[in-house]
């Protein structure tokens, strides 16, 4: 089996390395700012917005309890709250869609 070598450039220094096939993942692009997703599995504690609310970038949308810590899930951009896909008490998985944000523009 022929090894596939990859070239990495870090701080203007070139490195040649082998990346195992099971570690290769295609580039998926930047996350969609209109989809607010869970970054960790947990339980929804509180929803601080309602559908149709106008929010600014950085606004706290909901609280997610994960590993006995309350995590604030915030909006990355300003806009209108579209659909809220969860309710208090719901268990969520990593990358699960929580809220759709309608971003003007």
Image (spheres, helix red, strand yellow):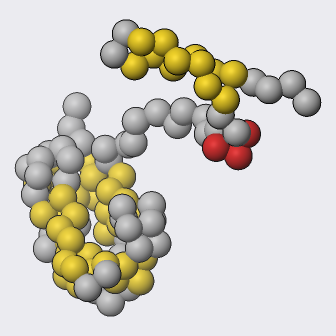
Residue 70 appears in the figure: yes
**Residue 5 horizontal side relative to residue 13, left or right:** right
Q: 89 or 49: nearer the eye?
A: 89
**Residue 68 horizontal side relative to residue 29, left or right:** left
Q: 19 or 47: nearer the eye?
A: 19
**Picture coordinates of residue 62, whole percent (x, y):** 20, 71
Does 38 sit above or below residue 31? below
**Residue 99 horizontal side relative to residue 91, left or right:** left
Q: 105 or 5: nearer the eye?
A: 5
**Picture coordinates of residue 19, whole percent (x, y):** 65, 34
Residue 52 appears in the figure: no
What residue lies at 70% left-to-right and 46% top-to-bottom? 22
Q: Quadrant of the N terminus?
A: top right
Does 4 sit above or below residue 70? above
Q: Quadrant of residue 10?
A: top left
**Residue 38 horizontal side relative to residue 29, left or right:** left
Does 43 sit above or below residue 3? below
**Picture coordinates of residue 84, whole percent (x, y):** 31, 69
User: Count the marks: how many?
Assistant: 0
What residue lies at 38% left-to-right and 85% top-to-bottom? 90
Q: Extreme bottom residue here? A: 89
**Picture coordinates of residue 26, whole percent (x, y):** 61, 35
Q: Quadrant of residue 91?
A: bottom left
Q: Quadrant of the C terminus?
A: top left
What residue lies at 18% left-to-right and 58% top-to-bottom? 74
């Amino acid at each position: 089996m022929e090894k596939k070598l990859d070239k990495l450039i870090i701080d203007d220094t070139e490195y040649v390395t082998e990346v195992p096939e099971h570690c290769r993942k295609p580039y998926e692009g930047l996350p969609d700012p209109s989809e607010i997703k869970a970054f960790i599995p947990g339980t929804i504690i509180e929803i601080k917005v309602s559908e149709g609310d106008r929010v600014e970038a950085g606004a706290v949308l909901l609280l997610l309890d994960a590993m006995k810590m309350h995590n604030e899930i915030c909006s990355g951009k300003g806009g209108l709250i579209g659909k809220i896909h969860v309710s208090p008490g719901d268990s969520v998985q990593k990358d699960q869609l929580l809220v759709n944000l309608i971003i003007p523009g």
